[in-house]
Image (cartoon, rainbow, N blue to C red):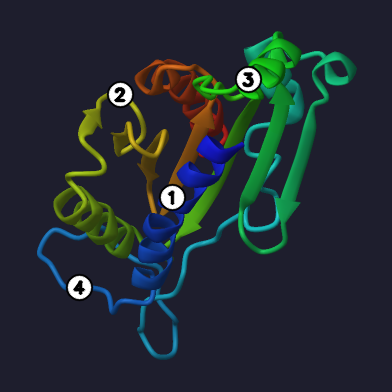
Amino acid sequence: MLRLCCRIALLLPALLYLACQSNTPEPAGAGAPPLAVDSLTGTPTSLPNPWKNAGCELVTDEEIKALFGIEVKRDVFNARTLADQGFCLRTWMKPDWKERESGNEKPGAQYLEFKNTLVTQVLDYGTETISRAQFDMVRRDQANVYTEAITGLGDGALWSNSQLSLMVKKGHLVIKITLDYADQPHDNLDKARAVARLALAKMR
């Protein structure tokens, strides 16, 4: 639990950074995609976000249970969402959670996480131009956190080994997937990719 709390603490600054930056004025640039505009004023308007109150529907419980081989009662599967946040938190126990929990209580033992955690969140930047600018800013300014560029996902994707997080841009939205499943941090990437593909299939 301590390791999970530390990782959540590390995750919060990046989420706050992205959320705060979402109010940044849209930068002008040649070749920008056409934006939805108000017919009277001609000013850009925000594109729709169908996942604002459907955080656990972008990737469904059934899809997650199939992907990870979860049995609800056996693994104490739980899912929680937050209103207006495009957010979903899922937790379930590891197969050997009792042994891990018991081992963690022994003096001098190296802590082993006994619960799996998956957080998915859709960050809405309103327009493609702002979304691209914010994604590029994270890639540039947080290169020491998001150290690996991932190909073949959305309009671009970045992986953070320290935060166990995969960030995928798709149009004016960014999907943030944080997965604590495998004991070795980088081993979480493959499953995080699989979760991202399930989400992206619904965002076409």
Could you tell which of marks 3 and 1 lies nearer the N-terminus? 1
Task: Name the residue beneath numbered marker 1.
Answer: 11
Could you tell which of marks 4 and 3 lies nearer the N-terminus? 4
- Could you say where residue 172 lies in the image, as x and y percent from the top left? 40, 55
Quarter of the image holding residue 32? bottom left
Task: Name the residue beneath numbered marker 3.
Answer: 106
Are there few (<14), some (14-19), or many (20+) residues within 10 Å of tag 3? few
Mark 2–mark 1 CB contact (< 8 Å): no
Task: Name the residue beneath numbered marker 2.
Answer: 152
Residue extending farthest to the right is: 73
Observer-nearest of 154 and 179: 179
The CA span between labels 4 and 3 is 55 Å
**Is 189 above or below relative to 42?**
above
The CA span between labels 4 and 1 is 27 Å
Tag 1 secondary structure:
helix
The reply to whether residue 18 is in sight is yes
